Every structure is written in C-alpha cells, then in structure tokens.
Amino acid sequence: MSLTETILGTLGYWSWIVLGLLLLGLEILAPGTIFLWFGLSAIVVGVFALAFGFSWQVHVALFVVLSLVSLLIGRKLMVRSAAETGDPGLNKRGSRYIGREFTLTAPLSEGAGKLSIDDTIWRISGPDLPAGTKVRVDAVDGARLVVSDANPAAEA
C-alpha cells in the first residue's frame, strides 16, 4: 500500500467536512460561486462517509461526480437568475424619460437648454421654445435629452 493510499484510507468523514468548510471559506475570500459548489460537495461526501462508511475510492468518485453536477446546475441557475434580475435601464437613466412630457422652466434657445426632472438637471436640445412650454422627450444623445414641443398644433 502506498503512502497516498494510507493517508486517504485513514482520513475519515471529518476530513471531507473540514475540506468543505475550507472551500466555503475560500469562496468568501474569492467570490465567484466556484468554490461554493466544491465545498458543498465535500460536506455532502463527509455526511455520506459518516452514514455509510464507504472506501476512500468511493469518497473521491462521489466528490468528483457531485462537484461536476452541482457546478453545472449552479452555473445554470446563476445565469438564469442574473438574466431575470436587475434593472436593464439602470445605467441608462435618460432612456426612462423617452415619451414622457415635462414643462420647461427656462426657455430653450439656440437649440440648447436645461430641464429639471426629479432630482436632476438635464441638458436638453431641440427647437427654440419659451419657458412654460410642454415638451416631450424623444431621444437620448449621450447625457443630453432631445425634446420637441408636446403640443405643436397649439402654436399654429
């Protein structure tokens, strides 16, 4: 019997549980959900070793199989949950205002002006309009909102 076989044969269920806890601790230091699945697999192998007393070869095989299965299932779940959560317009705040109407507090002259929306003052561009005119946000150009008169028939 080789030294490796002797060491693996004497390590009991507790070694798998300790390995699992170490891998979970490593997951805390290096997040990415890779070590999580290996750590959980090692803990499950430790519980199975305690309950059934398999040989070390079965422990290693069970660890490999559980690790691969849990890694694949975990990755699939993480990708799905990442796609379903979050706000797609989070970093495109101006796009939330497209189609909405606001009242100019200052005139829009020479194609440029400012518009206060919620807690932000936006730079706007569009046709020259006096203060008090209702404008509609038509597009976003970088950090500038492109607006037009919301009631063009009112001028005629």
Image (cartoon, helix red, strand yellow):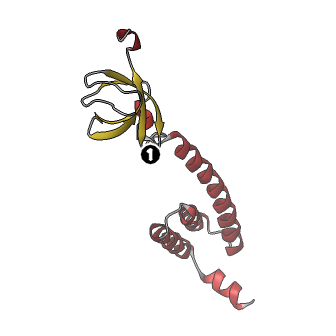
Q: Quadrant of residue 47?
A: bottom right
Q: Position of residue 155 (x, y in %)?
A: 35, 12
Q: Please identify the quarter of the rendering in which residue 10 is found.
A: bottom right
Residue lying at the far front of the rendered structure? 110
Relative horizontal placement of residue 77, taking residue 128 as reference (left or right): right
Quadrant for the C terminus, please.
top left
According to the image, label 1 marks what residue? 91
Mark 1 surroundings: few (<14), some (14-19) or many (≥20) residues within 10 A? few
Which residue is depicted at the point 69% across and 91% down?
A: 3
Where does the image place residue 145, in percent across and percent down from the top left?
Answer: 41, 35
The N terminus sits in image quarter:
bottom right
Q: Residue at x 49, y 67 (%)?
A: 24
Q: Residue type at mark 1? A: Asn
Using the rendered view, name the quadrant where residue 98 is placed. top left
Q: Is residue 111 left or right of residue 7?
A: left
Percent from the top left, x then y, of residue 20? 52, 69
Determine the secondary structure under disc 1. loop
- Residue at the right extreme? 1
